[in-house]
Image (cartoon, rainbow, N blue to C red):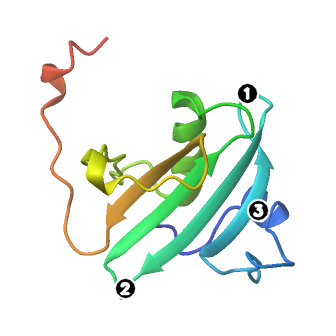
Amino acid sequence: MRTKLPERLEYGRIRRGEYRSMTGDLHGAFEIVGPNGRDLVILSSGSDSEHGWEHVSVSLKSRTPNWDEMCFVKNLFWDEDEVVIQYHPARAEYVSHHPHCLHLWRPIDGELPTPPSHLVGPKA
């Protein structure tokens, strides 16, 4: 996870209420306009060394975030060469506090394995 968040996030940081945080914190809540002109609500737990994970959630009011929006948020919080993942957990492990929310995860210690790109398809 980046050590300093982009100004775009700082501008949209929630500074009052339950989800408030201070300028420079890696954790917090943010409301910003995404790449498709839609309002994104983003929650970051920052780099949680107690549990070993970096975590960011992304939601919209009326629909689930799309690929472009998730890539946009990924690039706000992590460098382009860092790998993050979206999990599809076992049904018994589902937690849903918002009907249109997706999550990005990265372990603090260790690398995430990735499959060879040719298994997805040929590169253009």
Please tell me how crowded label 2 is: few (under 14), some (14-19), or many (20+) other residues with Cα within 10 Å: few
Lower sequence index among marks 3 and 1:
3
How far across and down, in percent of the image, does residue 82 sit?
A: 36, 54
Disc 3 vs disc 2: Cβ atoms closer than 8 Å?
A: no
Considering every residue shown, the one lying at the far front of the view is 92
Lower sequence index among marks 2 and 1:
1
Residue type (three-letter) at the residue carrying disc 1: Asn
Q: Nearer the viewer, residue 81 or 47?
A: 47
Label 3's element? helix
Residue type (three-letter) at the residue carrying disc 3: Glu
Residue type (three-letter) at the residue carrying disc 2: Ser
Residue highlighted by disc 2: 49
Residue at 59 percent of width and 75 percent of height: 26
Lower sequence index among marks 3 and 2:
3
Q: Nearer the viewer, residue 78 or 42?
A: 42
Please tell me how crowded label 3 is: few (under 14), some (14-19), or many (20+) other residues with Cα within 10 Å: few
Q: Quadrant of the C terminus?
A: top left
Q: Is residue 37 above or below residue 19?
A: above
How far across and down, in percent of the image, does residue 79 sit?
A: 46, 55
Q: For residue 51, which quarter of the picture?
A: bottom left
Disc sitting over residue 56 in the figure: none
Label 2's element? loop
**Separation (CA) of disc 2 from disc 1:** 33 Å
Q: Is residue 32 above or below residue 22?
A: above
How far across and down, in percent of the image, does residue 22 sit?
A: 76, 83
How far across and down, in percent of the image, does residue 46 sit?
A: 52, 74
Residue highlighted by disc 3: 7
Q: For residue 4, which quarter of the picture?
A: bottom right
Residue at 52 percent of width and 38 percent of height: 71
Residue highlighted by disc 1: 36
**Separation (CA) of disc 3 from disc 1:** 19 Å
In the rendered structure, the answer to whether residue 26 lies left or right of residue 78 reads right
